[in-house]
Image (cartoon, rainbow, N blue to C red):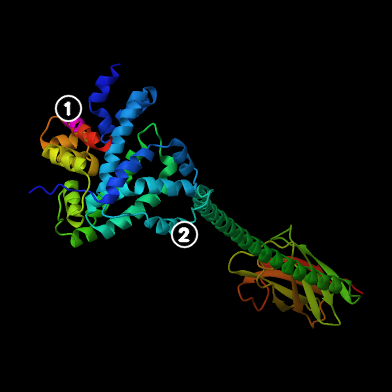
Amino acid sequence: MPLFIFFKREFYLLLLSKPLIFMQQDALILELQNGNERAFERIYHLYSESTYGIIYSIVRDEKIAEELLQDVFLKIWDKAPSYNSDKGRFFTWILNIARNASIDKIRSKSFKNDQQNLKADNFVDILEAKTNFNEAVDSIGLKKYIEALKPVCKKLIDYLFFKGYTQKETSEELDMPLGTVKTRNRACIDKLRAMVIK
Amino acid sequence: MDIQKYISSGILELYVYGALSEKESRQVSLILKKYPEVKTEVEEIEKALFTLSSAAAPNNAEHLITSIKEKLSNSGAATKTGRTPVRKINWITYSGWAASLLLLIGLFVFFNRTNELREELMAAKARNAQMEQQIANARQNAEKANDLLAVIRDKNVKRIPLKGQKVAPEAFASVYWNKQENTAYIDAQELPEPPRGKVYQVWSLTMQPLSPTSIGLLEDFEADNNKIFSLENPNQSEAFGITLEPEGGSKTPSMDQLYVLGTVAAP
């Protein structure tokens, strides 16, 4: 019995609202780089939840994820002046900070001792787990999307997006040619987009 | 450039993931700025991923902003000029190191200079001691000279020149004889140095009959600087003579070793 009824109400609302305001805002980033605390708050409001999702998908512990989320945003504040749009997207920049902090954490001794066995393997499991707590689910479209998502898509997105593998690492991990990683992934993201942007 | 082909290649998805090399990312950034349709595509990919990762968040994290902002305040960086203090701290650190280094160099130079000064001081002290010794010596010499002058000027003193004899025609000596004090001062400046194991002996002579009486030896002849020797002479001397005798002196003068001789002039 498929349990692909993933998203709680907040997420559904978020689908409708946040993407509308979410866009790389160059002026806001510049203010952040100048040390404007207001700009920092708005950046937090915009990016904290997706960053939290990335961190949680790697560490799988709410408390540790909360600590890391704070660390990551302190880093964002400190390192903001070093962000350069010529090198990539602001979202990508944040992603890298979040993934690196999380990976450092799970490689640390204290973490290894505490977390002998992680319950879930990738982001899909998190979404499933969440569904268990929120039976009242509303997004039929998203449910369809997840149903339609091929296992290879789940893996590609998990490695490339959540875990931050390079194209080469992903190709080796999945035993798939480099070019195929690129095109297959493109197809997977197309499907995701079809659900998110209506 | 075929933009549609570029978009469908899948490179933009990798770009948003951060899965490209830095060089490749820079190239995509340039194209993104040049072609609006590429930018739109990137933004849509971003939105989809943004939504997906947001869904993976276990709960709402909005409340954490309060504690994050507290940490910002504690680190002293939560002001509009918040970047400046960070640099200032660096600057202070650097200047601290610089100051330490300067202090170290300064201490080293100071230490060296102190040693030099100490050596100079020691040398000066040694010179000083030497000078003091010389002054003391000079004073002593001056006192001696004054004493001698006093002796010579005494109205009771008679000077008797002693002339060189056969063994030493060039030799010469003087006797300053104070009859009242029974003292004879022998000025032996012009006598040659006695050979090793020999010593000059001074004789008082009376003529009728000729009889010599020893009044003393010129001991430590070489060591005596002014070569003036003070001897006791209670005799009614009519002449003085100086002979070279074996160490310790002789009972009677060796006449073949008579160096100088002089008679006392009648008063």
Q: Is residue A42 above or below residue A112?
A: above
Residue A70 is left or right of residue A4, and the answer is right
* Residue at numbered disc 2: B74
Q: Which residue is drawn at 77% across and 76% down?
A: B205
Q: Mark 1 points at which residue?
A: A179
Label 2: element kind: helix
Marks 1 and 2 sit apart, C-alpha to C-alpha, by 49 Å
Return the x and y of residue A186 as percentages of the image width and height: 21, 30
Q: Quadrant of residue B211?
A: bottom right
Nearer the observer, A43 or B148: A43
The magenta stretch spans residue A186: yes
Instruction: Please report, as a chain letter, where disc 2 is located.
Output: B
x and y percent of residue B257 in the render?
67, 66
- Look at the image and tell me whether residue A125 can be seen: yes
For label 1, the crowd category at 10 Å Cα-Cα, with few meaning under 14, some 14 to 19 and many 20 or more, is some
Magenta region: A183-187
For the N terminus of chain B, the image quarter is top left
Secondary element under disc 1, as helix, strand or loop, is helix
Q: Is A172 colored magenta in this rendering?
A: no
Q: Is the residue under label 2 in contact with that under label 1 (CB below 8 Å)?
A: no
- The picture places residue B14, in percent across and down from the top left corner, at 25, 33
Residue lying furthest top in this view?
A: B1
Residue that sits furthest to the left in the current view: A1
Image: A165 above or below B81? above
